[in-house]
Image: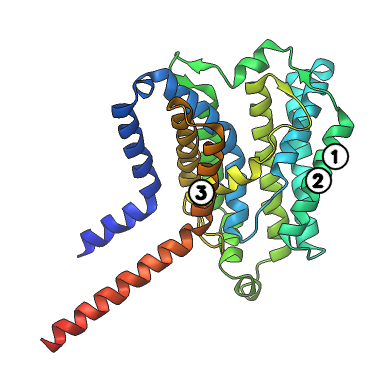
């Protein structure tokens, strides 16, 4: 009985990973494009750019909040770094963008924690604000000239492993340590489970919320750096809709929108899964309009997945209860 329970827990925790591996197997059988290493390298590289941002969003959603301004933060960071690089160099520019990301995250956090503005309203307002700032900084596309920086996201270690994916792994390990091994991580989980209980237990909820959005800003800035490296250019209108892709990855990975539960590992796997779906549709020649329909359906499923799991769980409990009562009567 204990063994069955353990297997059930493991499947529940890593169901998205099993789904991804099964999907890859089906694609490899049905489509020759998925039988080459290059296709998977491309998927991992593309997914890594979004998944880095997803690490920060995982913290926010675990706490019961989310950030709709991440796409605009990426755009602002992108135009700033492409302007600064020729002037102050690559490393100083990266440090400036990291600092800018932390500032944007801290500002969002203060709007929510100190002014008590709901996260939806606060981050929606800043979504427009940061995008406008990006346009004010530079309204025309800028091409990256630095060769080293442009190769940072596309380079393959040993000709096999995408550097972007290894960078993602490093950030994911750091994020997981923060979430699982530090007081801040425990506070985030507690706040997501119940803000009232967190206050009673002595947690400074306002400070924790600010730090959560600082983490969102930090990882969004890192994502912005990698996206610019991959594209080799920037413009103020880039990455529109990224927030929904990132939130979908987090929720599809099992992080509850209500808060209190989540996994950075599963967020990364879900991000890879979503990019695989898009790559498969491209490979099979699915019309771009139908691709949008499929992406919309995936978005609905992602946001409904917690409720679907609850309905299935409740149905199983009722079924077992009826079966037990029938056995007793017999």
Question: In this picture, is 329 found above or below 116?
Answer: below
> Percent x, y for residue 181?
52, 52
Along the polypeptide, which appears first: circle 2 or circle 3?
2
Question: In this picture, is 159 found above or below 230?
Answer: above
Which element type, helix, strand or loop, lies under badge 3? helix
Which image quarter is the N terminus in?
Answer: bottom left
Q: Residue furthest bottom?
A: 329
What residue is drawn where x is 68% and y is 28%? 225
Question: Disc 2 to disc 3, how far (Cα)?
Answer: 26 Å
Question: Disc 2 to disc 1, how far (Cα)?
Answer: 6 Å
Question: Residue tagged by mark 3?
Answer: 297
> Percent x, y for residue 150?
65, 16
Q: What number of labels is visible? A: 3
Judging depth in this view, the residue of 316 and 168 nearest the camera is 316
* Label annotation for residue 128: 2
Q: Residue furthest left?
A: 330
> Which quadrant of the figure has residue 257?
bottom right
Judging depth in this view, the residue of 184 and 72 nearest the camera is 72
Label 1 environment density (alpha carbons within 10 Å; few <14, some 14–19, many ≥20) = some
169 horizontally vs 111: left or right: left
Question: In this picture, is 285 found above or below 58?
Answer: above
Label 2 environment density (alpha carbons within 10 Å; few <14, some 14–19, many ≥20) = some
């Amino acid at each position: 009985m204990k063994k069955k329970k353990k297997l059930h827990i493991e499947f529940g925790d890593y169901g998205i990973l099993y789904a991804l591996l099964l999907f890859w197997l089906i694609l490899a059988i049905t489509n020759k494009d998925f039988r080459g290493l290059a296709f998977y390298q491309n998927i991992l590289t593309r997914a890594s750019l979004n998944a880095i941002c997803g690490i920060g969003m995982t913290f926010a959603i675990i706490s019961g909040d989310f950030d709709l301004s991440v796409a605009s933060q990426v755009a602002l960071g992108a135009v700033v770094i492409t302007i600064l690089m020729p002037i102050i160099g690559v490393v100083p520019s990266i440090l400036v963008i990291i600092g800018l990301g932390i500032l944007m995250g801290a500002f969002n956090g203060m709007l929510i924690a100190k002014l008590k503005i709901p996260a939806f309203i606060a981050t929606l307002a800043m979504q427009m604000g940061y995008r406008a700032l990006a346009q004010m900084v530079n309204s025309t596309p800028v091409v990256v000239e630095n060769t080293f920086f442009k190769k940072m996201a596309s380079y393959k270690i040993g000709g096999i492993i995408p550097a972007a994916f290894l960078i993602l792994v490093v950030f994911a390990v750091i994020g997981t340590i923060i979430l699982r091994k530090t007081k801040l991580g425990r506070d985030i989980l507690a706040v997501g489970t119940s803000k009232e209980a967190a206050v009673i237990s002595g947690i400074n909820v306002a400070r924790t919320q600010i730090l959560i959005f600082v983490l969102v800003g930090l990882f969004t800035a890192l994502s912005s750096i990698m996206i610019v490296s991959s594209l080799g250019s920037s413009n103020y209108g880039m990455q529109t809709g990224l927030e929904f892709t990132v939130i979908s990855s987090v929720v599809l990975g099992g992080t509850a929108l209500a808060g209190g539960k989540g996994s950075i590992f599963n967020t990364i796997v879900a991000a890879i899964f979503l990019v695989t779906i898009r790559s498969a549709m491209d490979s099979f020649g699915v019309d771009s309009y139908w691709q949008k329909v499929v992406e919309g359906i995936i978005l609905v499923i992602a946001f409904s997945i917690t409720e679907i799991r609850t309905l299935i769980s409740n149905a199983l409990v009722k079924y077992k209860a009826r079966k037990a009562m029938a056995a007793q009567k017999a």
